[in-house]
Image: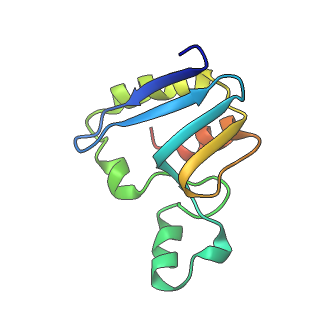
Amino acid sequence: ADDIDQVVFGGSCFMDEVVFFHKPTKTAIITDLVQRFPDEQVKGLTGQLMKLDGLVGENGSCPREWRLSFMFGKVKAREALAKINAWHANQLVIAHGECATESAADIIKRAFYWV
């Protein structure tokens, strides 16, 4: 459709994720690759592990074990990320944590520092 763009974020030996972009609202839709939980929602040992993994706070990231699964496929991941960055998303919808209503392109760049 004319309103939706997409890219397969590949390169992992375990998974691929399709990332969508809604053009009229400049919204990126990323289900599992970006997780960003507010600090007040994470507690105990699990919360500490999530913080160590970079999944807590404004930037968010991808779980460490998933990042490792891209070790030998970074070229594919970088190609997908280049397309995502070219969208210059303003909003971000994610499945795990807080969505963003502004500055999504900056959040995405920081979340994918590992690529």
Residue drawn at x 56%, y 46% is: 111
Count the marks: 0
Looking at this rendering, what residue extends furthest in the front direction?
1
Query: Is residue 40 or residue 21 the one in the foreground?
Result: 21
Residue furthest to the left? 13
Q: For residue 60, what is the image quadrant?
A: bottom right
Depicted 25 relative to depicted 100: above or below = above
Q: Quadrant of residue 74?
A: top left
Task: Indicate the colouring scheme.
Answer: rainbow
The residue under the point 45% across, 46% down is: 33
Residue shown at 46% from the left, 83% from the top: 45
Identify the residue shown where x is 55% and y is 27%: 84
What percent of the width, then of the height, locates residue 80? 44, 26
Question: As drawn, which residue projects farthest toward the bottom?
Answer: 44
Q: Is residue 109 above or below residue 76?
A: below
Q: Position of residue 3 (x, y in %)?
A: 61, 19
Work out whether residue 15 can be spotted: yes
* Residue 31 at x, y percent in the picture: 48, 46
Q: Nearer the viewer, residue 109 or 103?
A: 103
